[in-house]
Image (cartoon, rainbow, N blue to C red):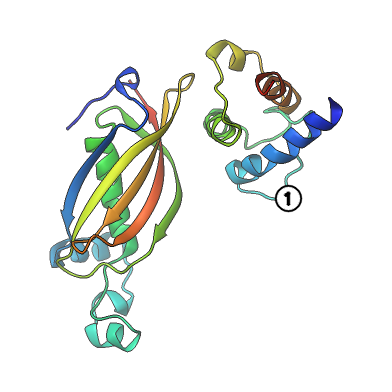
Amino acid sequence: MKSYTFKNLKIDQSSSCKVKFTEESIKQFISISEDYSKIHFDKKYAVKRGFKDKITHGMLLGVFYSRFVGVYLPGKHSLCIGWDEIKFNEPIYLNNVISIKGKIVHLNNPYKVATIKIKATNQLKKIVSTATAIVKLNE
Amino acid sequence: MKNEKKEILEKIQPIFFKVFGNENIKIDYDSSPETIEQWDSLAQINLIVGIEKLMKIKFSVSELANLKNVGEIVGLISTKKK
């Protein structure tokens, strides 16, 4: 786990991590969220709606965005105070490996708040999602 | 000067709507944490961060300490944009 303090952060500073979407992670997400929408576990149902397989929950990626901020950038001292503009551009399928990359685009000195633009891409380098995290450094 | 402040107020109003989650809330020069219930410390942070990004300016700790209402925020932005 990284533990950047506010004074260690710079504009354009970035970090990345990779996440594999497994059957187990989807099951755990369903268990916690109770989002039992068929599109997430019924292939036939998903194919009928234009997808090539069942798709993962968009907010399961959101869970990993949380990990990115809390573990990688800024890490230990992070206190997320907002998420802006979370977009899901492409479906994520089972066993897709997603790269999450975040870059600091704004630093507010008085309140020690970093704004981090996050981009998630799949193994085909397609952007599957973007988001903006507003993170206070709780040092 | 009056027009300039009015323009700034109009420009930053959407940030208040977004932070307070209400597009119908009335924001004028006298609006403050005393007059708007949702304007707590977390809202204050989100407002200032949003304004900095939108207006491409930076506030200092001492500048923020003296701000009492929207009118004073607009006045500060106006001096920084010169």
Q: Nearer the viewer, residue B22 or A115?
A: A115
Q: Is residue A67 above or below residue A33?
A: above
Question: Label 1 amino acid?
Answer: Asn
Q: How many marks?
A: 1
Within-10-Å neighbours for mark 1: few <14, some 14–19, many 20+? few
Report the residue at 60% width, 17% height from top: B64
A52 left or right of B82 in image: left
Q: Nearer the viewer, residue A120 or A60?
A: A120
Can you say which quadrant of the picture contains the C terminus of chain A?
top left
Q: Which image quadrant is residue A90 in?
A: bottom left
Report the residue at 72% width, 26% height from top: B74
Extreme residue toward the front, this view: B82
Please provide percent x and percent y for residue A134: 42, 37
Q: Is residue A38 above or below residue B16?
A: below
| Chain letter behind tag 1 | B
Report the residue at 73% width, 50% height from top: B24
Please provide percent x and percent y for residue A89: 37, 64
Judging by the rendered image, the residue that carries numbered circle 1 is: B24
Can you say which quadrant of the picture contains the N terminus of chain A?
top left
Please provide percent x and percent y for residue B80: 65, 20
Please provide percent x and percent y for residue B52: 56, 30
Callout 1 secondary element? loop
A14 left or right of B56 in image: left
Extreme residue toward the top, this view: B62
Q: Which image quadrant is residue A113 in?
A: top left
Q: Is residue A117 above or below residue A61?
A: above
Extreme residue toward the right, this view: B2
